Image: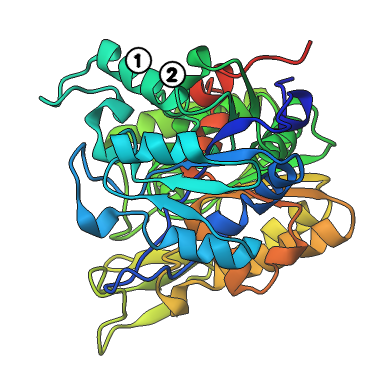
Amino acid sequence: MKKTVKDIDVKDKKVLVRADYNVPLDADGNITNDKRITATIPTLEYLLEQNAAIILMAHLGRPKGKVVPSMSLKAVPQRLSELLDKPVQFAESDCIGAKAKKAAADLKGGEILLLENLRFHPEEEGKNANGEKDKAAMDAFAKELASMGDVFVQDAFGTVHRAHASTAGIVKYVKDAAAGFLVEKELKFLGEALDKPVKPFVAILGGAKVSDKINVIENLLTKVDAIIIGGAMAYTFLKSQEVPIGTSLVEDDKLDLADEILKKAKERKVDFLLPIDHIAVDKVDFANKQIPQGAIVQTTIDDVIPEGFMGVDVGPKSIEKFAEVLKNAKTIVWNGPLGIFEIDQFSKGTIEIAKIIAESTENGAISVVGGGDSVSAVKKAGVDKEISHISTGGGASLEFLEGKELPGIAALPNKK
């Protein structure tokens, strides 16, 4: 178990907090979704109760080590100030510059300072000014950040799968470090789901490619009672079993791998569920996320997709079959949509699964949802408040499900 913020002395201390404020902005630089900001409030409120001076560190976008004005964090302090009902200072221009260091030095207990985008420095991501990997440069940058505070709190789960200066490197240069409440919650739900799940344990995996989820599937096969597969990667599995899939998206170079996975599932007595019917269309406009005029949409009678048609969602029989398994589940982990969720007409399977998971949760199951589209689905279905835990880190939660060590977590000290 990792130390949490309650396990370290933060009273009257200067506390460096790594937050995930990589928020979406509109063309005018306004925040369009503040969930990543609101997710940090419990940790910040606790620190304020302890009269800590809070120095927030975050990134936004991928500026690739250069100052990109459109990726400034300047919109965040105002929203954070509104949520906390207190002023939030902003260290413009440079997160480790003279102004930022003076602002940090002058910060008093109960005050908050947000540093500018960490990724304006290539050293944050372990590179030097030439874009080459440079651990010494990253360590020096981590040391500069650490010099502004006494202790470090990791509360950015969305970045802990990165071995960056502000996630892993900084820990060795501070007096103490711990996980914030957000990271603690992520580790609790994801950790318990994988390490000691209440059975039956069902995983739902969607998305486009088997190659993106192969490590997740391999890891879950040793833990789950059933796996439900949807999205385009289902067609690779179906084709590996010589089921006609029309013009559906497929990874032909992964057919043998898909066949191997199915055999492993059988050996381990894991129920591996693929769609038994589909919503199929003869043409689709992926670029504009719409169905072209004159396109023919049909529901197949079984798992066979006719020639000239591509599968774009699971059909009603598949939803019914998946529902039977999910209604008996006691632990459910979901990552990835079951169809072309971005097009409303092809989002029914994903939305219905979201509702079924919510129903199972209401009946006592523990449900964990991760991945952008899955999170959007539970919100679109209006059941996000009924899910046990919605992960804030897509990439991090995926790597956690793969069984990988997350550098930003590994760097934190364990409880004694």
Q: Nearer the viewer, residue 9 or 393?
A: 9
State yes or no: discs 1 and 2 in contact (Cβ < 8 Å): yes
Classed neighbour count for the residue bearing mark 2: other residues with Cα under 10 Å, few (<14), some (14–19), many (≥20): many
Position of 95 with respect to 327 (left or right) is left
Q: Residue at x 43, y 70 (%)?
A: 32
Q: Give the position of the C terminus as an image quadrant.
A: top right
Give residue 295's position: percent from left, percent from top: 29, 83
Q: Residue at x 52, y 43 (%)?
A: 19
Name above or below for residue 35 compared with residue 259.
below
Name above or below for residue 134 compared with residue 223.
above
Residue at label 1? 139
Amino acid marked by disc 1:
Asp
Q: Give the Cα separation between the discs numbered 1 and 2.
A: 6 Å
Classed neighbour count for the residue bearing mark 1: other residues with Cα under 10 Å, few (<14), some (14–19), many (≥20): many
Q: Residue furthest bottom?
A: 294
Residue 87: which quarter of the image?
bottom right
Give residue 274's position: percent from left, percent from top: 56, 50
Q: Nearer the viewer, residue 198 or 236?
A: 198
Give residue 220's position: percent from left, percent from top: 62, 30
Q: Nearer the viewer, residue 301 or 182?
A: 182
Residue at label 2? 169
Q: Residue at x 59, y 33 (%)?
A: 15
Position of 318 with respect to 253 (left or right) is right
The mark nearer the N terminus, 1 or 2, is 1
Q: How is the image coloured?
A: rainbow
Amino acid marked by disc 2:
Gly
Q: Secondary structure at mark 2?
A: helix
